[in-house]
Structure formats: structure tokens, C-alpha cells
């Protein structure tokens, strides 16, 4: 193989040092000290392989290898480097390291691309800190405003704008992070499967042709706080009791809808969170996904009706739409190129629909996009046990490398 297995392993293990929860998984929230450590490492490694390193207004990291014709659009390879709390070491970083390894091979073999090659490491894909996933790719494609960055807050009430300012980034210049369509030839992302299919089938890679549609809402239930011992049961306006009445009905909506629809209550916060205080506010998120948009819309409509029906006896409900993405169909041309690369390398592969959202689906609105999966041990992800064998990851990187070499050549379709 052209890639270096030991180098891939070392990069992933070094990135995993930057976690707020050692021995309890990877916790690397955007704009945290762990983010800063990881970004400094990535910038250093990008520079070592001859890339020109820069950061945009919200902190996405770019490493650029100039093409023979710098005016042509770039082929971008990468993923995100933030994590969920107590997550795994591969979700996101595997794709970032893919880009870094591709650049390393170009550097070693002194490959001069005709089209520029860019490596990207993106922030806040998970939405774990500010509740709005895919922030980087949505910013790059012009879907995020400075007002949004000043409004979205983390659990401590810190706005995204404030947090990024702590690392030297400027939310008021978010417009400068937007990429034009004519500046990007293609975006290719490698990701762990986050499911058991490849491992069960003993296959090397999956080539994704569709990403499911998804939506995320944030729900705030408000009541009235009171003393746990002195407020009669019939006089209470308990926000948590109201929330539980809602939450117990939601999973059944996805089951009834069918079509592979899934619904998840991912975050749940109770205020003031005192053992002897009746809760006056509950905030939770609802994530709905399906292969067909109609299933997402149907389930979302029914979810909102159930929430709104809880507004009685002094309880109020607020619904905030955080994210909505239609099912995304990826580039047939890049899918074919990835297929040819996998065939050439003799790897076992399949075409797959992604049940998880990825930055790739946002980029698909502006350029040609390819997404490739590598196996996940026991299908586990977003947990400390998340694992992909390094040699399996290397095979996926080889497929990306082979494809990127073709797409950056002068003969590549312009």
C-alpha cells in the first residue's frame, strides 16, 4: 500500500490525547482547551507535509497543496475533529487523518496536482456544545449568520461567538468563511460506519450514495417552581411531569411511521435541578431521521402536535427548529470513481445509505461529493468502545487516495 499504517495509527492516538475525559472516552468540545490542543497538533502536522495552513473565521482548519493551476477549484478531503461527550476516537478524526495521510503520500511521492488539494478539519459537526450540528459545513455553504452565532449557547450560557473569540476567531466575520461553488471541485469524506453491516458481511468499505433526511428540534417546557414538601400535588405546575408525558409518546411515532424512521431524545436538562424543588423548566432535543422526506415530515408534525397538546394547567411549550436537511443524493461521478478505486485495489465493498448525518451531505448542495465508510467493531459509535482496526481504516484511506489522485489530475473532468 502507498499509505503508512504506523503513521495513521500514531496520528489517531495522538489526537485522542486531547480529551477532557481520559480513560472514559473522547470528549473534545468545540473551542475548548482540548480543541486547541488538537488543532495545534493538526496544523503542525499539515505544515510538515508541505501544506499551507490557515483557519477561517469560525476555526475550520485548512491545509492547501497548490495545484499547477491555482485558479482551478480544489478537491477537498476531510471531516470534523470535535466529539460527543465520552465518545470514541474514530468518529470524525478518521476522516481528518485520511486527508492528512493523502497529503503525506503526495508529499512523499512529490505528486504535483493540477487541481489544488485541500485538507480540512472542521468544528462542531456533532452539535455537542451548542446544539446545532454540522455547524462548519453549514457555515462554509452560507447557512450560518453572525446573529445565529451570537444567539446559540452551550449549557453554561456561553454563546458560540464568545467561545470562538476565546480562541481568536470572530463570529462577526463568519461571511468570510463561505466558499463559492467555483472554488470547490469536490469534497470527499471518510467516516466509520457507526453500524454493524460491514463487519458482519466481512467487507472492507461501503460507498455511500444517499444520506437520510433528518431534523432536530429543541423543546422548552415551562412551569412553576415550588417547594417539594409544601406544594400540594394538585396545585403543581411541574415541568418535568409534563415533559415525561410528552416523551413517553414520541418513540411510538417513529414505529408507526415505518420506512426506517427513527426518533431520539438526545438531550434532557431539568431546571433548577434541585432534589427538593419542583422543576420549573425542562429542555430536551428530538432527532428524527428517515430515508424518505415524507416520513421525516410526518413524524415531525405529529411530534409538534403532541408537544403543543401539553400546554394546559399553567404549562407552556416552546419549539425551536435547530436543523432540517432533506435526504441527500451524493455524486454519481465520485461514487463511480470510488468504485473503480476499490475494484483496482481488490477490496470488498457495497453501496450503502447513511443513516447518520455528515458534513458530506451539506457540501452536496454546492459541489460533487463522495462518502466512504470503513467497518465499526460491533457497530458501536459515540461511546468509548468505538473502534475500527487500523488496517481496515488504511484500506478506506487507500480508496480515497486513489480517487483523489485521479480527481486532481489535469485529465480530470473540468
Image: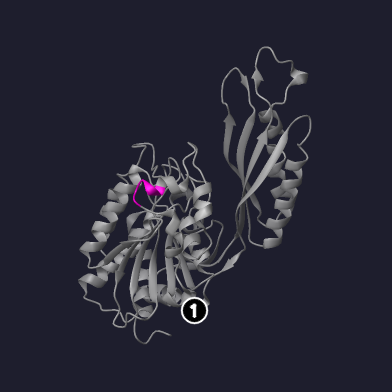
Q: Is residue 260 magenta?
A: no
Its colouring scheme is: one colour
Q: Position of residue 69 (x, y in %)?
A: 31, 83
Disc 1 secondary structure class:
helix
Looking at this view, name the residue that lies furthest to the bottom: 411
Residue visible at 37% across and 87% down in the picture: 411
Q: Position of residue 105 (x, y in %)?
A: 26, 69
Q: Quadrant of residue 95?
A: bottom left
Considering depth in this image, is 295 or 397 the residue closer to the camera? Answer: 295
Q: Quadrant of residue 239?
A: top right
Task: Judge whether residue 30 can be spotted in this image.
Answer: no
Q: Magenta span covers which residues? A: 164-168
Q: Position of residue 77 (x, y in %)?
A: 38, 67
The answer to whether 345 appears left or right of 227 in the picture is left
The answer to whether 147 appears left or right of 62 in the picture is right
As displayed, is residue 312 above or below residue 301? above
- Mark 1 nearby-residue class (10 Å; few <14, some 14–19, many ≥20): few
As displayed, is residue 194 above or below residue 181? above
Q: Main secondary structure of the magenta part?
A: loop
Task: Judge whether residue 145 can be spotted in this image.
Answer: yes
Q: Which quarter of the image is occupied by the C terminus?
A: bottom left
Q: Position of residue 101 (x, y in %)?
A: 29, 64
Identify the residue under disc 1. Answer: 333
The answer to whether 107 appears left or right of 329 in the picture is left
Amino acid at each position: 500500500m502507498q499509505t503508512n499504517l504506523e503513521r495513521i495509527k500514531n496520528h489517531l492516538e495522538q489526537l485522542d490525547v486531547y480529551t477532557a475525559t481520559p480513560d472514559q472516552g473522547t470528549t473534545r468540545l468545540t473551542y475548548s482547551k482540548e480543541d486547541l490542543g488538537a488543532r495545534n497538533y493538526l496544523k503542525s502536522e499539515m505544515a510538515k507535509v508541505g501544506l499551507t495552513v490557515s483557519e477561517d473565521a469560525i476555526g475550520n482548519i485548512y491545509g492547501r497543496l497548490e495545484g499547477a493551476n491555482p485558479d482551478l477549484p480544489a478537491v477537498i478531503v476531510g471531516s470534523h475533529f470535535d466529539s460527543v461527550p465520552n465518545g470514541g476516537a474514530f468518529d470524525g478524526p478518521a476522516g481528518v487523518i485520511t486527508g492528512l495521510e493523502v497529503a503525506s503520500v503526495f508529499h512523499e511521492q512529490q505528486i504535483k496536482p493540477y487541481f489544488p488539494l485541500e485538507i480540512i478539519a472542521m468544528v462542531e459537526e456533532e452539535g455537542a456544545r451548542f446544539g446545532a450540528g454540522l455547524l462548519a459545513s453549514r457555515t462554509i455553504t452560507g447557512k450560518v449568520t453572525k446573529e445565529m452565532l451570537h444567539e446559540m449557547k452551550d449549557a453554561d450560557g456561553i454563546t458560540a461567538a464568545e467561545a470562538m473569540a476565546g480562541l481568536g476567531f470572530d463570529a462577526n466575520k463568519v461571511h468570510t468563511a463561505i466558499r463559492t461553488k467555483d472554488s470547490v471541485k469536490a469534497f470527499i469524506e471518510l467516516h466509520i460506519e457507526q453500524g454493524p453491516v460491514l463487519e458482519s458481511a466481512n467487507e472492507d468499505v461501503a460507498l455511500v450514495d444517499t444520506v437520510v433526511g433528518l431534523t432536530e428540534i429543541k423543546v422548552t417546557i415551562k412551569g412553576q417552581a415550588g417547594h417539594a414538601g409544601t406544594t400540594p400535588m394538585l396545585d403543581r405546575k411541574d415541568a418535568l411531569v409534563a415533559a415525561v408525558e410528552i416523551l413517553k409518546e414520541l418513540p411510538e411515532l417513529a414505529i408507526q411511521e415505518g420506512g426506517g424512521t427513527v426518533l431520539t431524545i438526545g438531550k434532557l436538562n431539568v431546571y433548577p435541578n434541585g432534589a427538593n424543588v419542583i422543576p420549573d423548566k425542562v429542555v430536551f432535543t428530538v432527532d428524527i431521521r428517515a430515508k424518505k422526506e415524507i416520513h421525516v415530515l410526518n413524524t415531525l408534525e405529529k411530534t409538534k402536535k403532541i408537544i403543543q397538546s401539553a400546554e394546559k394547567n399553567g404549562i407552556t411549550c416552546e419549539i425551536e427548529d435547530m436543523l432540517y436537511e432533506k435526504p441527500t443524493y451524493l455524486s454519481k461521478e465520485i461514487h463511480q470513481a470510488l468504485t473503480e478505486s476499490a475494484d483496482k485495489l481488490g477490496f470488498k465493498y457495497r453501496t450503502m445509505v447513511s443513516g447518520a448525518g455528515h458534513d458530506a451531505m451539506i457540501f452536496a448542495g454546492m459541489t460533487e461529493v463522495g462518502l466512504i465508510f470503513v467497518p465499526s467493531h460491533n457497530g458501536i459509535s459515540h461511546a468509548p468502545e468505538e473502534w475500527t482496526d487500523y488496517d481496515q481504516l488504511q484500506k478506506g484511506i487507500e480508496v480515497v487516495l486513489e480517487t483523489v489522485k485521479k480527481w486532481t489530475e489535469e485529465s480530470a473532468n473540468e
